[in-house]
Amino acid sequence: MSVLAPERAPVLDEPSAAPAVRTRKKDFAGLVLAAPFLVLLVSTVLVPVLYALYLSLFTERLQGLGFSGPENVFIWLGNYLSVITDKAFHAGLGNVALFAFIHIPSMLIGSLVLALLLDSGVVRLRQMWSLAVFVPYAVPVVIGGLIWAYLYSPTIGPIKNLLGIDPLSDSAVLPSIANIATWQWVGYNMIIFYTALQAVPKEIVEAARADGAGGFRTAWSIKIPVIRPTIFVAVVFTVIGSLQVFTEPMVLRGFTGTVTSTWSPSMYVYEAAFVAGDNGRAAAASVLLAVICAVLSAVVMRFSTRRSSR
Amino acid sequence: MSFADSKSRWVSVPAVHVILVVAALYSLLPLVWLVTSATKSLGDFSTTGAFSFGEWNLWTNVKTLFTQENGIFWSWLLNSVLYAGGGAVLGSLICAACGYAIAKTSFPGRRLLFALTLTGVLVPTTVLALPMYLLASELRIVDTFWAVFIPLLTNPFGVYLARVYADASVPDEVLEAARVDGAGQLRTFFTVALPMMRPGVVTVLLFQFIGIWNNFFLPLVLLTNPKLFPVSLGLFQWSTRQTQFPQYTPLVITGSLLAVLPLVLAFLVLNRQWRKGLAAGSVK
């Protein structure tokens, strides 16, 4: 995963850039320093992931006459099968797909355009503009969701009157949820892109100008290609975030009946585990979601390396 | 920047500023609404404009907020500060130590650890929540401070960042010099390397603070006792009641304002710090 801005590209990707200092063969002080994180990683990520895999292969069933209480029964991939064939899970996947389809382009294009404008040199008070757009990132997701929910609400908020449509109605609620996420993340990604743009060599930009390239041309053919690795990393993180969307629809559920309890796959997992109490099905759904995330981010990264090696 | 200023008038300046004004309004108007609404009584929501002030009711709202359910809002704020503040300080130190160890020492298995860390970045919380809840029940720590605090210390991306910062800001010659002077590895880390990595570590700290303050799924799953809730979970719980009890609406709005203010202020005050950190890492 190369998350670095172009100019620093050679710094790492493999920990093998061994410093000359390493004289002692066995370096246990390093292990001592790494130990606290190692313990955390094992106990709060590794073990839970393995446990989820284990859980996903079992289901609770009443045995015999049911006097002995439910027992865990190994059912191979039965839980996966019941998730894959569950219409509610399909609907959740459809919702996040559509959510991503709206949220990802609008957010990334918005933040890229703003970053390029800030970088173009015609903008006064750059700091002020970037801070203004960044502020929503500092708002907790629950609270961002609540603010927009009130703004959407037909009795309190102004948006219904402004647009003439009810943002919480069946057909509009999905773009409304996407808007909350876009509002929260545009500024953050703008800062990331703007920071990466600082690494574009001034001489190249200057040479392009001397050759008569206009601002759009410079941005499109020089600046964007140079920061492409950064853009792809932003795409990966946004894809993963979109697939896992949970908080925004959960908050809107308190305001409208149009968001179902299994609206997104994450909500499906929550519902299966903590409302229905079906741990096996919840674990299977969460493993499936993780696999989809992994596959999609691999696809995006593959696409990015192929494009940039051309 | 002076170079760019003189050369590149490539789009019409007014058009650029119109776009910026629209973007700034889109970003800030919801927060303006939050401020004006926190000053209103329940009745004024339907009778006054969304972005205008009604009758000044802020102090009444704040007073009701802090006395509701025996002042539980205080506990929520305090919990959030403890979870996010304690978690960010301890968590970023753990990240810094591990990132430094991976970048600058050669303990056995560090490659594997780094690979696991990168994988850890991509594991969705959704996958972790249920097994964590079950494990926490086994350990009988569900509904305790630690059930939420410990998992949120884990910040694989912070380790990744710390490694980049250690690589970029701690020269090998300095470590060599410290070694020649007879300083042990641990002492070298705390007295030499850590201060050099400070801007990066502050960035990790700030973003981990935000991450924990924002986290919703884990507290929702692991806590049932309202006294242990962080502020966003508490406000969420109140917001689910307002269909039946509209008097919760001003409380949720005023509470939201008070929960947002410290974060926005932290970002404004630490503006230069986190920008420098982001630039130093040049990473997302």
Image: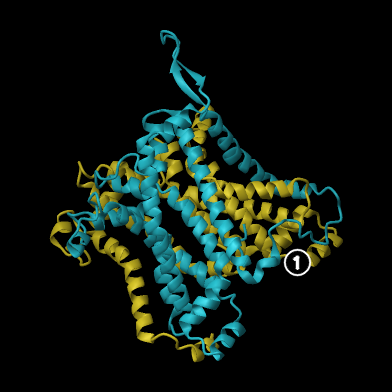
**Is B142 situated left or right of B74 in this image?**
right
Q: Secondary structure at mark 1?
A: loop
Q: Position of residue A85 (x, y in %)?
A: 40, 33
Q: Residues within 10 Å of mark 1 (few under 14, many from 20)?
A: some
Report the quarter where the C terminus of chain B lies. bottom right
Q: Position of residue B259 (x, y in %)?
A: 37, 55
Q: Colour of chain A?
A: cyan
Closest to the observer, A253 or A283: A283
Which chain letter matches label 1?
B
Q: Is residue A247 above or below residue A102?
A: above
Residue at horizontal 34 percent and vertical 59 percent from the top: A179
Q: Which residue is mark 1?
A: B171
Closest to the observer, A42 or A174: A174
Q: Position of residue B69 (x, y in %)?
A: 29, 41
User: Which chain corresponds to the colour yellow?
Assistant: B
- Mark 1 is on which residue type? Pro
